[in-house]
Image (cartoon, helix red, strand yellow):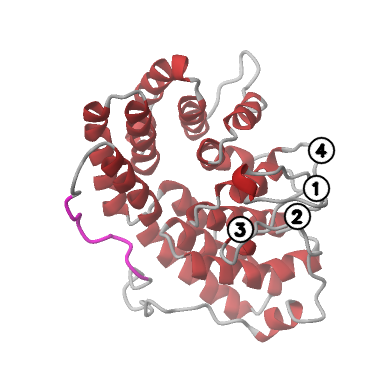
Amino acid sequence: MLRATSCAYTGDVGVGAAAAEEASRLAEESEHPLWCAGSYFSVADVAAVRGDVGLAEEMVDRGARVAHASNNRALVNGALHARGLAAFVDEQYMAAFELMAQMFDQDGPTHHPARKYWLLPFVSECAVLSGESERGRALLAGLRPPPGVVLGPETRCGMLYAEAVLAEDGDAAEAFQAAFAGGVAERPFLGARLQLAYGAWLRRQRRPLDSHGPLRAALSTFERLGTKPWAIRVRRELEAAGVAEVEPGTAFAGEGWEMLSPGNARSPGWRPRVSATARSASGSTCPRAPSGPTCTGSSQARHQLPQAAVVGTGGRVRVTQATAVI
């Protein structure tokens, strides 16, 4: 399960799909509801990053009931994490930001001391795309280490990435340079996302021709990794930067769930079996989260919003009460 979720962070959806399938199979054999729920979240994480929102949401729905019934904090965080990723790739950026931001609140019931660092790049992207850059910068400020504390390489790269994408226009050039030079470019998925952010910033600075290089490089990486949601965003940026026709890329490396270990390949429509124990634990007798405020609209209604959510732009997000919902 941990390997599958780790692959969601690195964009390695082929290996992640294999790990998620194996975790689900072993959990099903154990018929232990907590392991089954955790495996569903690992499937959801990988499915979200490769753009399969339907599968991601289906898996979160299965596991979330068990998480609530057990009151297991790790599972509740897993559900929140997977739900946020699904909302993010479904382009419901406000909902995704509000969901993920819960784990940054040290006084909240869903605070997670490690996962908030893992999620920082995603939260930073959501903050920018939802018009909440100021709130994103506040979350980032709360994670900066005190003097003398040395961050691990992955955490440091995540911080550098967040500093760059959340920077004010006057500080952005220096922040992007620091991120590229600080090791972010050496990580394919995060580096390509940095190229996407940099290309988008160049375009906004009325430098469309300069944006083509980083955007094309990012597109090549996203298509190779199989991270479709980001490839789609790059293509939009290239079109906005004046590229009349973006050449068709290579086939997505993570296409379908057939990218699994030899002998264990499943069909693209594969869904983990719900064991009898997990089904009982997540059935109608299992306590569910209270109905909470949601994004309006048929597509947006799938992503529940958390406690103390704010009103989004254009009236797309409306909050009537404070609650924590996954």
Reading the chain from its start, which is encountered first: label 4 or label 2? 2
Residue 298 location, quadrant:
bottom right
What residue span does the magenta drawing correspond to? 247-256
Residue occupying image coordinates x 59% and y 73% = 27
C-alpha span from label 4 to label 2: 14 Å
Reading the chain from its start, which is encountered first: label 1 or label 2? 2
Instruction: Determine the secondary structure under disc 3.
Output: helix
Residue corresponding to mark 2: 73
Q: Is residue 149 left or right of residue 196?
A: right
What's under tag 1, amino acid-wise? Answer: Pro
Reading the chain from its start, which is encountered first: label 3 or label 1? 3
What's under tag 3, amino acid-wise? Answer: Arg
Q: Is residue 216 visible?
A: yes
Residue 179 counted in the magenta span: no
Reading the chain from its start, which is encountered first: label 4 or label 3? 3
Do residues under tags 1 and 2 come within 8 Å of each other at their CB atoms?
Answer: yes
Choose mark 4 or mark 2, whichever is in front: 4
Instruction: Determine the secondary structure under disc 4.
Output: loop
C-alpha span from label 4 to label 3: 21 Å
User: Farthest residue in the bottom direction?
Assistant: 276
What's under tag 4, amino acid-wise? Answer: Asp
C-alpha span from label 3 to label 1: 17 Å
Residue corresponding to mark 4: 107
Residue occupying image coordinates x 79% and y 69% = 288
Choose mark 2 or mark 3, whichever is in front: 3
Q: Is residue 39 visible?
A: no
Residue corresponding to mark 3: 83
Residue corresponding to mark 1: 109
Residue occupying image coordinates x 57% and y 72% = 58
